[in-house]
Image (tube, helix red, strand yellow):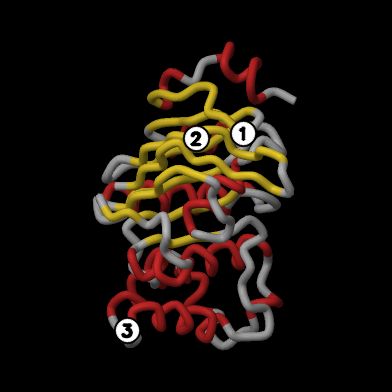
Amino acid sequence: MLSLSDINVSYDGSRILRGVNIEVPPRSLVCLMGRNGVGKTTTLKSIVGLVKTDSGVVKLDGKDLTTFRPDERARSGVGYVPQGRDIFPHLTVWENLKLSLVVHGAKANGQVDRVLELFPILKEFLQRKGGVLSGGQQQQLAIARALLTDPKVLILDEPTEGIQPNIIDLIGDTLVKIKKEGKISILLVEQYLDFCLAVGDNFYIMDRGSIVASGPIAQLNDDLVKLHLTV
C-alpha cells in the first residue's frame, strides 16, 4: 500500500536519511522503531511531504507521490498524526473533527459516527475545547481527525507518548480493529516495545538514518532489542 524507495534527506548539508526503504503492505500494521534522533520522524515527514527529499520515491497504492504537496498527499490517502498530537486547542472537539472533512469536501455523515464509535469519549466532549482534554483524550481526537480524511494509510508518530496505560490499551485495540477491517494500512513510529509486539505485523529498526533490521514482528528478538533499541 505504501512504499519508500531509497529515500535520502539532508538538513543544512548533514545527511539525515540514508537510502531508506520501507514497505507497508495492505491490511497490515508496520512498526518503525529506533532510539531517539535516528531519523524516524524525518522519515514520516518525508512521506507526508513536510520535508524535501534529496532523492528516492514515495508511492501510495502504486501512485508516485514524490512531487506532491502535503495537501495533495492528504487527498491521495495519507493520514498523519504527528508527535505531540497538534490538535487545535482553541477549537471544540467537533470543530477539530469538522476540519478534516474539508480534505475531500465531505459532509458530516457516517464517517463521523464511525470515529465516535471507535472513540466514544469524544462524543461526550463534542462542544468542549480541545485544549482542556487530557493527553489521552487529545490523542484519540488526533487519530479520529486523521481517520476522517478517509486515508489509505494512517501514519502515527509515537501515539503512546505521555498517555496513561488504560488509554494506551484502548488505542492499541482500536488500531488492531482498524487494521482488521482491511481498508487502512498503518505505519507506526513507537518506542514502547510491548505496544509494538501487541499490535504490529512487521517491524523496521532505524539507526543513524538507515534501516538496520526488519522482518515479521515475531522475529524481533532480545538480541535486536539490545543492539538497536536499549538505551
Q: Residues within 10 Å of mark 2 (few under 14, many from 20)?
A: some
Q: Which residue is mark 1?
A: 209
**C-beta proximity under 8 Å, tags 1 and 2:** yes
| Callout 2: SS | strand
Where 186 sits versus 230, above or below?
A: below
Q: Which residue is mark 3?
A: 106
Query: Which amino acid is tagged 1?
Result: Gly
In the rendered image, residue 229, in percent from the top left (x then y), is placed at 65, 25
Quadrant hosting residue 14? top right
Quadrant hosting residue 149? bottom left
Q: CA distance from mark 3 to mark 1?
A: 38 Å
Residue, far top: 223
Q: Which residue is mark 2?
A: 20
Task: Choose the circle earlier in sequence order: 3 or 2.
Answer: 2
Quadrant showing the C terminus: top right
From the viewer's perspective, tell me whether residue 78 is left or right of residue 109.
Answer: right
